[in-house]
Amino acid sequence: MNEKVQYLKDMGVDVETGISNMMDFETYDEMLNDFYDSLKEELTKIDGFKNAGDMPNYAILVHAMKSNARSFGFMKLGDISYAHEMASKSNDIAYVNEHYNDFLQAANEAYDIITKYKTM
């Protein structure tokens, strides 16, 4: 456990908050795997709503991404998802499109961090 926790800390993950949110490390570890397993599918759905200009459904999914990311301590992804949530709720398609690569980069960083975490 300590090696995994230290790795997440080293990667900028607020793992203490994540473990606290999940009650214990074992639950955190299990739930993080579930988040990881669904991440690429969720990103595909988010991309589809963005491309369709469907801001109400986009907002729902980036809201969920924000909540999940923050729950596990991935604050950068949580903060960027929050900005996208607020923009999409305001129907600010221009913001969403202009900053979408930032969102994807943060999501992919989280995915890559968890990928390595799972091998430990």
Image (spheres, grey):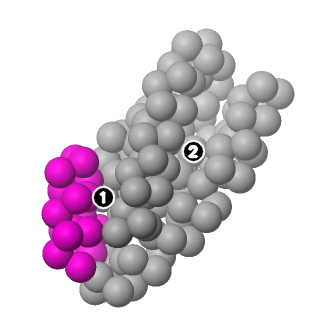
Q: Position of residue 49 (x, y in %)?
A: 76, 36
Write down the residue under mark 1.
Answer: 73
Q: Position of residue 109 (x, y in %)?
A: 42, 41
Q: Nearer the viewer, residue 2 or 82?
A: 2
Q: Nearer the viewer, residue 26 or 116?
A: 116
Residue 108, placed above or below residue 2:
above
Q: Main secondary structure of the magenta part?
A: helix
Disc 1 secondary structure class? loop
Residue 104, placed above or below residue 30:
above
Instruction: Mark 1 or mark 2: name the one nearer the start of the chain.
Output: 2
Please check the rendered image and state whether residue 76 is part of the magenta-colored stretch, yes or no: no
Marking on residue 18: none
Q: Position of residue 115 (x, y in %)?
A: 46, 56
What span is colored magenta in the figure?
1-20
Give the CA distance from mark 1 to mark 2.
Answer: 16 Å
Foreground mark, 1 or 2?
1
Quarter holding the C terminus is: bottom left
Quarter holding the N terminus is: bottom left
Q: Which of 61 and 87 is in front in this view?
A: 61
Residue 72, placed above or below residue 60:
below
Q: Is residue 35 left or right of residue 23?
A: right
Residue appearing at x 35%, y 86% in the figure = 26
Residue appearing at x 33%, y 40% in the figure = 76
- Toward the right, the furthest residue is 52
Amino acid of disc 1: Gly
Q: Is residue 52 left or right of residue 15?
A: right
Q: Can residue 71 be seen in this view?
A: no
Q: Nearer the viewer, residue 41 or 115?
A: 115
Amino acid of disc 2: Val
Write down the residue under mark 2.
Answer: 62
Q: Is residue 24 left or right of residue 106?
A: left
